[in-house]
Amino acid sequence: MLNIVVLVSGAGTNLQALLDAEEAGIIRGGRIIHVISSNPEAYALERANRHGLCSSVVNRKAFLTADEFDSELLKALESCEADLVVLAGFMCILGERIIQRYANRIINVHPSLIPAFCGKGFYGLHVHQAVLSYGVKLTGATVHFVNEIPDGGAIILQKAVEVYKGDTPETLQLRVMRQAEWKILPRAVSLFCEGKITVKDNLAVIND
Ligand code: GAR
């Protein structure tokens, strides 16, 4: 069984999808052992608590530099003996040390079809606002490995979602979460834990 540690910063609906999937037996080969939040106010912490799951806070705002934050986060991950790190609505960019220490063992969910609407500045509702401003008719979500390039790691799974006339960033966000994120994130985590993903030259292949 692989040790899964989930990193969060906000509402934690993706964490909830993972917890529900685990309870339903959908995640094979791994168990969620710990939740770490970069924000002490995150509702995700309440979700972890209600599930009887250990959690801790590494408060981004308590550190002057990204490097100090990374050191503390790395310590926390090492003390959990994490095999897989899942970024589920985690709003901080990880530093090189963590990315290299957990190369191809950090998974992120991003609320668009990468390589569209991703990279620096594209997070949370900003992504959906940009999608609406551009007028694309299809968007979606992507689960990918994390490398040194923001949202640039190997893509594991993607799912397309329609943009409707009259959508607001909020209505679109909810549809993308419901139809894509909450489905492909648990699926990707399970595939990883079952050893069904191989990565070569920044391309992920699923051997299912
Ligand atoms: C989700 O849509 C997630 O994909 C996005 O923020 C939301 C967090 O929701 N993440 C990013 O934009 C990271 N770049 P949640 O806290 O309810 O899971």
Image: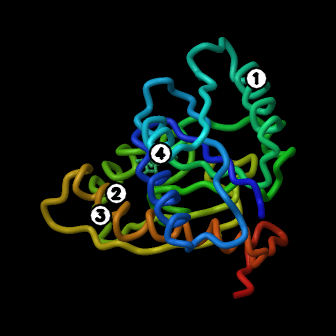
Instruction: Name the one closer to the observer, 34 or 104.
Output: 34
Depth check, mark 1 against mark 2: the one in front is 1
SS at mark 1 in the image: helix
Question: What is the crowding at mark 4: few (fewer than 14 residues within 10 Å), some, or many (at least 20)?
Answer: some
Question: What is the crowding at mark 3: few (fewer than 14 residues within 10 Å), some, or many (at least 20)?
Answer: some
For the residues labelled 2 and 3, the Cα–Cα distance comes to 13 Å
Q: In the rendered structure, which amino acid carries the disc numbered 2?
A: Val
Assess mark 4: CB under 8 A from ligand 1? yes
Q: Which mark is residue 131?
A: 2
Residue 61 against residue 70 in the figure, above or below: above
Residue 49 against residue 132 in the figure, above or below: above
The numbered mark, 1 or 2, whose residue comes first in the sequence reads 1
Q: In the rendered structure, which amino acid carries the disc numbered 1?
A: Asp
Q: Left or right of 149: which side holds 174?
A: left
Provide residue 151's location: percent of width, then percent of height.
61, 53
User: Disc 4, disc 2: CB below 8 Å?
Assistant: no
Assess mark 2: CB under 8 A from ligand 1? no
Instruction: Name the residue located 56 percent from the left edge and 33 percent from the top edge.
Output: 37
Q: Which mark is residue 175?
A: 3
